Amino acid sequence: MIISIFGPPGSGKGTQSYLLTNRENFIQLSTGDMLRSEVSNNTDLGMKVKKYLDSGKLVPDELIIDVVKARLDTLVASYSSLRLIFDGFPRTEKQCLMLADILTDMGLSMDRAFLLNIDLEDLVRRLVARRVCSSCGKVYNLVLSPPLKDNLCDNCGAVLIHRSDDQENIIRERIKTYSEFIDSIKSFFSNRTTIFDIDANQSIENVYRDIVSKLFIKK
Ligand code: AP5
Ligand code: MG
């Protein structure tokens, strides 16, 4: 099963992907996480993409496409029945076309897409207080869902990270970028699968409940 979770920065894509990974055996393919890992490992790609992440702009398509394709190849070769979540991909028309070609070549299809809808004013508030586990990826919020011990993950004890793009001016730029592309992404998904609109203003568990209730029903 292949699904996509999409929505604006801070809408809860990573949070919901984390829950689906731990509770329903999904694997998350987050292009944002992949790019940040390239930056922290100081790879050639990391050095090329850093300026885009730091400014809230999208990384050029040609730098993304090969990375996603390589990851997908590995996953498809490793799992006989893959449960995969695309988090934050595709993000442009070109990425949509490329994904459609790859899925066709691999004999795969997109089974469902979940659009996390949220009041935009809440996003900045959520993101400035976000912390993410440097090891297992669990997402926290210092106000709404803080860790039990300061700056340490409840789950694995690793240090929590404050993402460099979680600054108010960059968050606003990321929201602007999202608004420019969202219509073409929606039209891509609506031509290929069912899009479920999810109210992401609810609690984390209620958002999760809504997603899971749509996950296994017959379309
Ligand atoms: P990416 O990493 O994808 O970031 P994003 O889209 O801006 O989304 P976020 O990860 O910030 O938010 P989220 O929706 O995952 O929210 P989360 O669950 O963490 O991309 C970063 C950058 O990489 C881009 O700007 C671009 O430069 C580049 N990039 C990535 N993909 C690309 C692509 N395909 N093409 C080109 N460039 C690309 O939650 C946020 C906070 O809210 C947390 O504190 C959490 O605890 C809290 N929260 C979550 N849900 C709830 C809830 N229901 N109620 C209350 N609080 C909640
Ligand atoms: Mg995320």
Image: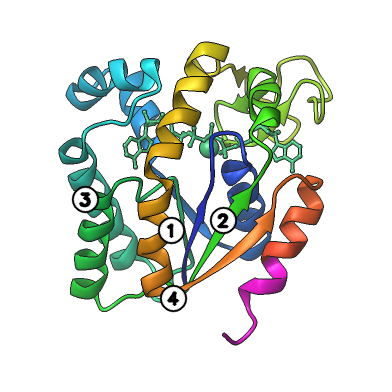
Q: Give the residue pinned by disc 4.
A: 81
Position above or below: 45 against 33: above
Q: Give the residue pinned by disc 2.
A: 115
Q: Nearer the viewer, residue 180 or 80?
A: 180
Q: Amino acid at mark 2?
A: Leu
Q: Quadrant of residue 37?
A: top left
Q: Give the residue pinned by disc 1.
A: 186
Camera-near label (3 vs 1) is: 1
- Of labels 1 and 4, earlier in sequence is 4
Q: Would you say residue 59 is visible in this rendering?
A: yes
User: Residues at badges 4 and 2 in contact (C-beta under 8 Å)?
Assistant: no
Q: Secondary structure at mark 4?
A: loop
Query: Mark 1 and mark 4: span between their CA atoms?
Result: 27 Å
Please state if 149 lies on the left or on the right of 99 as rendered.
Answer: right
- Name the image quarter holding the C terminus: bottom right
Camera-near label (4 vs 2) is: 2
Position above or below: 158 against 23: above
User: Residues at badges 3 and 1 in contact (C-beta under 8 Å)?
Assistant: no
- Of labels 3 and 1, earlier in sequence is 3
Residue depicted at x 57% and y 13%: 168
